[in-house]
Image (spheres, rainbow, N blue to C red):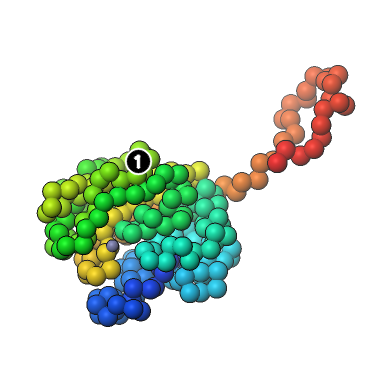
């Protein structure tokens, strides 16, 4: 059996503490529900990191041992330290997978990786959401059929301020008439990124079987299994080079 995929579930853990409705839906926190869904799979080894932890739970040691990072944030995006965002960004470029959930469309790390506004329309009014599977060939949609419904969710609408996705996986339709690119992938460096829209904190979305299936599939897909550090080496030739009369006058300062 191959080595397990090491997953870190990160959350700001804030709504759960101040909104009794959210606490009732997610007594172990949103991160607890996400981790529990992933822990049903024998090939996933799941840890939790929170905003309130030292270095937000994302020390260099933790990140080095994380194959896939799952990110839920909303009201505390600004409290995430820039140094931690930079460290996560570096690991994504090296090959760590990143799954960005719901309101984390506005997280520092997603905006930095996308380089665009990541803005959208929204409405909290008990819309029904129908997610259409537009990539039935893709590993993320296996076992899901051509669509599934979330009975009540917050509406997110287009235009979504993202760069053109590498792959579009889901399109959502909402009762109010809007549509939204609810599942999309990008590659940045050696890292695979998946944005997945559902998961407003006042609905039981992460307890729904189809949503959990997407999370599990996406985690496996995002685990690239590579780590390509940014070392930019000065490289000796593989072959004997011809005499270079100007070699002595060329700068020997390392390229940085
Ligand atoms: Zn929301």
Which residue is located at x 36 percent, y 64 percent?
A: 74
Decide which of 210, 28 is in the foreground and name it: 28
User: In the drawing, does residue 233 fall left or right of residue 40?
Assistant: right
Secondary structure of the residue carrying tag 1 is loop
Which residue is located at x 13 percent, y 48 percent?
A: 177
User: Where, quadrant-wise, is the C terminus in this rendering?
Assistant: top right
Q: Is residue 235 above or below residue 119?
A: above
Can residue 167 be seen in this snapshot? yes
User: In the drawing, does residue 14 fall left or right of residue 248?
Assistant: left
Which residue is located at x 52 percent, y 48 percent?
A: 93
Dot 1 crowding, Cα within 10 Å, few <14, some 14–19, many 20+: some
Q: Position of residue 226 (x, y in %)?
A: 51, 49
Q: Is residue 30 above or below residue 110?
A: below
Q: Position of residue 179 (x, y in %)?
A: 19, 47
User: Where, quadrant-wise, is the N terminus in this rendering?
Assistant: bottom left
Q: What residue is disc 1 on?
A: 165
Q: Position of residue 230 (x, y in %)?
A: 61, 46
Q: Total of numbered circles in the picture?
A: 1
């Amino acid at each position: 059996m191959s080595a397990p995929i090491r997953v870190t579930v990160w959350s700001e853990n804030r709504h759960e503490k101040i909104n009794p409705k959210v606490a009732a839906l997610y007594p172990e926190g949103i991160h607890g529900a996400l981790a529990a869904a992933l822990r049903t799979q024998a090939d996933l080894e799941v840890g939790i990191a929170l905003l309130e932890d030292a270095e937000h739970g994302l020390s260099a040691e933790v990140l080095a041992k994380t194959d896939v990072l799952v990110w839920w944030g909303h009201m505390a995006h600004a409290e995430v330290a820039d140094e931690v965002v930079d460290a996560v960004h570096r690991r994504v470029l090296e090959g760590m997978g990143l799954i960005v959930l719901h309101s984390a469309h506005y997280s520092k790390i997603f905006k930095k990786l996308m380089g665009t506004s990541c803005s959208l329309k929204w409405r909290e009014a008990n819309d029904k959401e129908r997610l259409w599977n537009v990539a039935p060939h893709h590993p993320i949609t296996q076992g899901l059929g051509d669509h599934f419904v979330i009975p009540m969710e917050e509406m997110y609408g287009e235009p979504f301020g993202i760069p053109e996705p590498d792959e579009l996986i889901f399109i959502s339709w909402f009762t109010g008439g809007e549509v939204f690119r609810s599942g999309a992938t990008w590659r940045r460096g050696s890292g695979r990124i998946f944005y997945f829209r559902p998961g407003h904190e006042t609905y039981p979305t992460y307890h729904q079987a189809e949503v959990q299936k997407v999370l599990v599939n996406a985690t496996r897909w995002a685990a690239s299994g590579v780590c390509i550090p940014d070392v930019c080496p000065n490289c000796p030739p593989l072959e004997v080079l011809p005499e270079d009369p100007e070699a002595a006058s060329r700068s020997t300062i390392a390229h940085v």
